[in-house]
Amino acid sequence: MEKIFVRLEMKIIKGSSGTPKLSYTGRDDRHFVPTGLYIVRTVNEPWTMRISKSFKRKFFYNKKTGTSTYELPPDSIAPFHICYYGRLFWEWGDGIRVHDSQKPQDPDKLSKEDVLSFIQMHSA
């Protein structure tokens, strides 16, 4: 998740009247103006996906049976309707600070630090 924020920068873009706008640079050096971030669950219950601490490899764990595997179990792949209807959109509107150069964070809105600490806490 942190890798997303590394690619964010403030740029003066066409139509911004000289005001820097938040911009995301893709691997192909193309830029776009993000308005938020979709968080999509792609793994079907009762499966979870983690990174192995010892081998640094992705593995799948079945919470119901207690089994784990490095191979992708076909039944762990969430169907489209689960991904689509269960997705969350974190809007990066006014008061949301995802880059150091942006205005101060509104304390009543979800911050980048809150999101990253939640992910860190639930991935341990």
Image: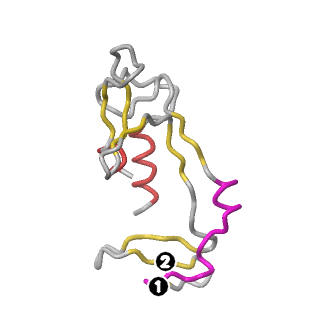
Of residue 53 and residue 99, the one placed in the foreground of this image is 99
Q: Is 1 one of the magenta-colored residues?
A: no
Residue 19 locus on image (x, y percent): 35, 16
Colour scheme employed for the rendering of this structure: secondary structure
Of residue 20 and residue 55, the one placed in the foreground of this image is 20
Residue 121 locus on image (x, y percent): 42, 55
Q: Which residues are magenta?
A: 70-86
Q: Name the residue type under label 1.
A: Glu
- The residue pinned by badge 2 equals 60
In space, the residues marked 2 and 1 are separated at their CA atoms by 7 Å
- Residue for point 50% across, 81% down: 72
CB atoms of marks 2 and 1 within 8 Å: yes
Please rate how many residues cluster around mark 2, counting C-alpha atoms within 10 Å: few if below 14, some from 14 to 19, many from 20.
many
Residue 1 locus on image (x, y percent): 39, 52
Q: Is residue 91 left or right of residue 13?
A: right
71, above or below 112, in the image: below
Residue furthest top as drawn: 17
Q: Is residue 70 left or right of residue 8?
A: right
- The residue pinned by badge 1 equals 71
